[in-house]
């Protein structure tokens, strides 16, 4: 299954090569994902996509 979100669209529009990887549904940090994938934590970029219209955030 191809992952499509704002980040992948951004990269696609700029013709940036990348690969996506599925990780377990449990909440993992970048360090845990790096260990799971066998790479250094510096090579892991995680994105969180939210719907701002539904999010209840308070900015100060």
Image: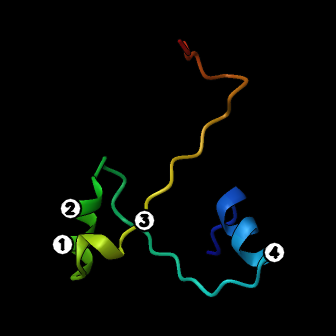
At label 1, counting other C-alpha atoms closer than 10 Å, the crowd grade (few under 14, some 14-19, many 20 or more) is few
Q: Nearer the viewer, residue 17 or 23?
A: 17
Q: Residue at position x 37%, y 65% from top?
A: 23
Residue 30 higher or lower than 16, as above or below: above
Residue labelled with disc 4: 13
Marks 3 and 4 sit apart, C-alpha to C-alpha, by 19 Å
Is disc 3 placed on a helix, strand or loop?
Answer: loop
Q: Nearer the viewer, mark 4 or mark 1?
A: 4
Position of residue 58 measured from the top left corner of the image (x, y, whole percent): 54, 12
Q: Residue at x 73, y 24 (%)?
A: 53
Is residue 17 shown above or below 25? Answer: below
Earlier sequence position, callout 2 versus callout 3: 2
Q: Nearer the viewer, mark 1 or mark 3?
A: 3
Label 4 crowd (10 A; few <14 / some 14-19 / many >=20) = few
Rendering coords of residue 41 (x, y %): 25, 70
> Mark 1 and mark 3: span between their CA atoms?
13 Å
State the CA–CA distance, disc 2 to disc 4.
30 Å
**C-alpha distance separating marks 1 and 2:** 5 Å
Alpha carbons under labels 2 and 3: distance apart:
12 Å
Residue 32: numbered disc: 2
**Label 2 SS:** helix
- For the residues bearing labels 1 and 2, Cβ distance under 8 angstroms: yes
Return the residue at label 3: 45
Secondary structure beneath dot 4 equals helix
Residue 52's image quarter?
top right
The quadrant where residue 1 appears: bottom right
Q: Are the residues at dot 2 and dot 4 in contact (C-beta closer than 8 Å)?
A: no
List the residue tagged with mark 1: 35
């Amino acid at each position: 299954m191809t992952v499509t979100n704002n980040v992948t669209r951004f990269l696609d529009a700029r013709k940036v090569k990348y690969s996506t990887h599925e990780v377990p549904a449990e909440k993992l940090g970048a360090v845990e994902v790096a260990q799971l994938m066998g790479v250094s934590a510096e090579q892991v970029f995680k994105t969180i996509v939210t719907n701002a219209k539904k999010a209840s955030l308070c900015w100060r």
